[in-house]
C-alpha cells in the first residue's frame, strides 16, 4: 500500500501539469531554406480509373509513365502489377509483398 500511493501521485502529475495554464503557443514554422524547390505537381501520381463489368483498374502514372496498376476483380481480392525495373514490363505482386519497391543503392563495391 505504501508503494501504491507514490505511483498514483506520479501518474497524476501530467494531468496536474496541464492544469497550470502557463502553456505557450509553439513558434511559427520557418520558411523553407533557399534553393529548395516548390512542390512539383509532375511528381504527384496521376490515377486513372477504368471500370468494366469484370474488373476495376487503377493506373498510376508519374510524368505520364505507367508504373503501377491495381486490379480489383468483381469477384476476388485485388492485386497489383508493378514495373519494378522501369522497362515497361509489369510484374504481379503477391498479397504478402508491398507494391512499392524500397530504394536500393550500391554503397560500396570492391
Image: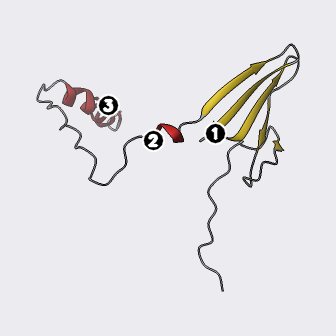
Q: Name which quarter of the figure residue 19 lies in.
A: top left
Q: Position of residue 98 (x, y in %)?
A: 71, 43
Which label lies toward us, 3 or 2? 2
Q: Is residue 35 above or below residue 67?
A: below
Q: Residue at x 41, y 40 (%)?
A: 39
Left or right: residue 65 versus residue 8 is: right
Q: Residue furthest bottom?
A: 110
- Mark 2 closeness class: few <14, some 14–19, many ≥20 residues within 10 Å: few
Q: CA distance from mark 3 to mark 2?
A: 52 Å
Q: Which mark is residue 106?
A: none
Residue denoted by label 2: 40
Which label lies toward us, 1 or 2? 1
Q: CA distance from mark 1 to mark 2?
A: 14 Å
Q: Which mark is residue 8?
A: 3
Residue denoted by label 1: 64
Quadrant where the C terminus sits is: bottom right
- Mark 3 closeness class: few <14, some 14–19, many ≥20 residues within 10 Å: few
Contact, mark 1 vs mark 3 (Cβ under 8 Å): no
Q: Position of residue 73 (x, y in %)?
A: 85, 22
- Mark 1 closeness class: few <14, some 14–19, many ≥20 residues within 10 Å: few
Q: Residue at x 85, y 16 (%)?
A: 74
Q: Earlier in the sequence, mark 1 or mark 2?
A: 2
Quadrant where the N terminus sits is: top left
For label 1, the SS is: loop
Left or right: residue 18 versus residue 99 is: left
For label 3, the SS is: helix
Q: Earlier in the sequence, mark 1 or mark 3?
A: 3
Q: Residue at x 80, y 37 (%)?
A: 95
Which label lies toward us, 1 or 3? 1
Amino acid at each position: 500500500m505504501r508503494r501504491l500511493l507514490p505511483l498514483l501521485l506520479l501518474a497524476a502529475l501530467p494531468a496536474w501539469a496541464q492544469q497550470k495554464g502557463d502553456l505557450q503557443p509553439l513558434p511559427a514554422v520557418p520558411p523553407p531554406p533557399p534553393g529548395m524547390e516548390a512542390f512539383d505537381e509532375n511528381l504527384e501520381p496521376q490515377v486513372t480509373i477504368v471500370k468494366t463489368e469484370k474488373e476495376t483498374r487503377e493506373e498510376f502514372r508519374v510524368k505520364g509513365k505507367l508504373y503501377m496498376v491495381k486490379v480489383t476483380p468483381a469477384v476476388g481480392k485485388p492485386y497489383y502489377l508493378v514495373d519494378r525495373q522501369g522497362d515497361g514490363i509489369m510484374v504481379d505482386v503477391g498479397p504478402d509483398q508491398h507494391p512499392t519497391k524500397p530504394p536500393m543503392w550500391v554503397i560500396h563495391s570492391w
